[in-house]
Image (cartoon, grey):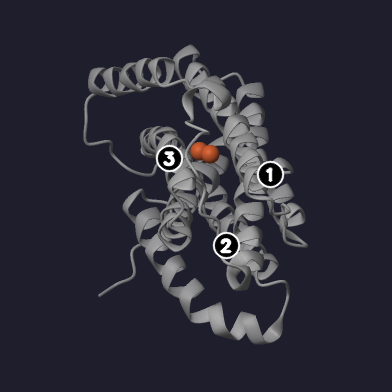
Amino acid sequence: MLPTQIVTPPSSQSSREHQIATLINNAENGQWQIEKDIDWSIHPSPPNFLTQRFIGRALGALMAGEEATAAACKMLLADSPDADLSACLEYQAADEERHAKVYRAYLERVGMPALIPDGFREATKQLVNWKGPPTGLVFAVHVVLESEALTLQHELSDDIRCPLFQAINRRVTQDEVRHVAYGQLVSANAQLTEQERLETVLAIKGIWDACIKALVHDNAVLWRAVKGFSERRWALQAKSLERLGLIDPVPA
Ligand SMILES: [Fe+2]
Ligand SMILES: [Fe+2]
């Protein structure tokens, strides 16, 4: 089957090149160091005893997600994309590794163990073992999981209300916004066959469900409690995949 251009990019090729050049420039200027660029003298206000376990698991999931995303970027690099896209991915892999380290450093600073939920590494391994087209992995990582991680980071920042965590999060979020922008640019030019498109959607939904189940620890009661929330979040993601042409629009 012939590849189909799944969406017509709204901007011209030169505009796309300009946007990628801007992303590279921002990534270059936006590199930061954990020791130097976070004010570790800020007194932390860690979560209270009751919420520590939940927060620790959420942060553990974010850390594992960062590591898996760094690995996914390296896989995309192995596919030898154009030089400008390679530059974006190289900066991103460095960003994600730094994010995992800074979350670990925060947990150490506040004396909380890193609780990576059982099954979460297994769930994210599906990214590293991705068998579909490279652009499908961009949809999975950059469009769906990165935007979901951004939401989780914002919610955690509100929940924890710790000035040190908020200072860290401001740095991390600046990087993540670039990564999401990269995903939008690349996925808007994706060329997938119908079969690749359908398989990509199925694979992303499989990873999504596995991550949510790992987060609730395969606990049936918790799963029932978050199922509705997860479905509402997935509906938003599906809308965004629909806008990018990966999912067929649902007839009104
Ligand atoms: Fe990240
Ligand atoms: Fe990211």
- Residue 194 image position (x, y, % from top left): 50, 51
Q: Residues within 10 Å of mark 2 (few under 14, many from 20)?
A: some
What is the CA distance from the residue labelled 1 to the residue labelled 2? Answer: 33 Å
Q: Secondary structure at mark 1?
A: helix
Reply above or below: 41 against 81. Answer: below
Residue linked to disc 3: 167
Q: Residue at x 39, y 32 (%)?
A: 178
Q: Residue at x 28, y 39 (%)?
A: 8
- Residue 80 image position (x, y, % from top left): 60, 18
Q: Along the line of sight, which residue is nearer the eye, 25 or 238?
A: 25
From this viewpoint, is residue 131 visible? no
- The three-letter code of the residue at mark 1 reads Glu
Left or right: residue 40 versus residue 177 is right
Residue linked to disc 2: 205
Residue mark closest to the camera, 1 vs 2: 1
Left or right: residue 197 versus residue 122 is left
Find residue 129 and report its image quarter: top right
- The three-letter code of the residue at mark 2 reads Lys
Left or right: residue 17 versus residue 68 is left
From this viewpoint, is residue 195 visible? yes
Q: Residue at x 72, y 55 (%)?
A: 116
Residue mark closest to the camera, 2 vs 3: 3
Q: Residues within 10 Å of mark 3 (few under 14, many from 20)?
A: some
